[in-house]
Image (tube, grey):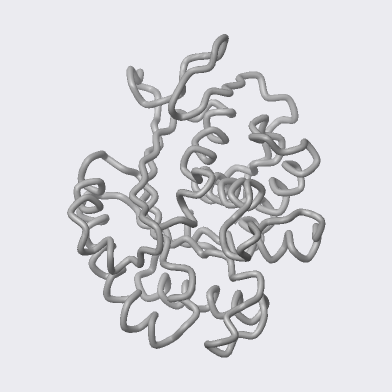
Amino acid sequence: MNLKTFPSKITFLIVCTLFFVAPGCAPAMDCSNLRADEACTRVLFIGNSYTYVNDLPATFVNLARSNGHKTEVGMSAQGGWMLSDHVKSADTIAKINSEKWNFVVLQEQSEVPAIPSSRQQEMYPAALQLVGDIEAISAKPIFFITWAHRDGLPASGMPDYESMQAQIDNGYIITAQAFNLPLAPVGVAWQTVRNLYPQINLWQADGSHPTEEGTYLAACVFYADIFQHSPEGLSYRGNLPADTAQALQKAAADTVSNGQWGIP
C-alpha cells in the first residue's frame, strides 16, 4: 500500500486536546456542525491498559486534528481485560452501538495472542462475536497488533522479546486473516524502533506498559493505517522532543507502507 506524503509545511494546525480547548487554540476538529462536503472519521478503541495508559485515543485524535482531519474517538478499556471480557460487558456493547463508528479497534490482552491455546479458546470466539457486532453497525474492525513484553514470556516458552513478538504477530495475523480484516501493525513498528533507535525507551519500568513514546508510536501507526497518509511532518508531538517524534513518525510510516495490512 502506498502512503501519500504530506507537504512539509502544514498550513492548518490544531493543537487542542480531545477534552478541552486551550486558551488561544482553534476550535476542536470534532464532527459537530459538519458541512455537506466534509467527512468525519470516528474511531472506537476497545482494549485494556495498553490502550488507556497515556490515552492512546486522545493521542491519535490530536495527530489527526493537527492535519485538519475531523475526527472523533471513543474508548472502552479496563485493566487486564481480554476481548472475552468485552463480549460480556454491557458497557462495551452499548459503546459499539452508541455512534456511527467508521473503525473499531480490537486490542487483546497482551499475552493471549502469543499462546496458541489461549488464542483458540479465548481470542477467536470473542473476536467472532465482536466482529459480528461491529459489522452490524457498518463499521470496520481493526486488529491492534500489540508489542511484546521487554523480557518475553519465559513461562510460556518465549524467553525474550523477539520470540514473544514473533508469536504475537503470528497470532494477530492468523486471526485477522480468518476474518479477512485489517491490522494495525504497532508491534511491528515497535520492533523497528527497538532495532533502529535503541535510545528511545518504549516500555515503562514494568517492561510491559508503554511510555509516552510507545503510545505516540502506536498512535502514528493508527494514523498511517486509517488515513493512508504518512504521519511524517505532523506538528503534534505531545511532550516529546522533535527528533524523537520524527523518528517515531518515520518508523510508523515505513511499517505501514512496507506491509499488506488490509486497509485499502
Q: Quadrant of the N terminus?
A: bottom right
**Residue 25, position in %: x, y?**
55, 14
Q: Residue furthest top?
A: 24
The residue at the point 65 percent across, 70 percent down is: 150
- Determine whether 164 is above or below 82 in the image: below
Residue at 38% of width from left, 82% of height from top? Answer: 118
Question: Could you tell me residue 237's position as x and y percent?
Answer: 66, 35
Q: Classify 187 as above or below 123.
A: above
Asked whether, in this view, residue 125 is left or right of residue 201, the answer is: left
Between 222 and 203, the one nearer to me in the picture? 203
The image quadrant of residue 105 is bottom left
Q: Position of residue 116 (x, y in %)?
A: 43, 86
Q: Which x, y percent locates residue 186?
A: 58, 59
Q: Is residue 11 left or right of residue 47?
A: right
Above or below 16: residue 233: below
In front of the other: 146 or 260: 146
Farthest residue to the front: give it. Answer: 205
Q: Is 20 displayed left or right of 160 in the figure?
A: left
Disc tally is 0
Residue placed at 39% from the left, 59% from the top? 106
Question: Which residue is rendered at x = 33% and y = 49% of the image?
Answer: 76
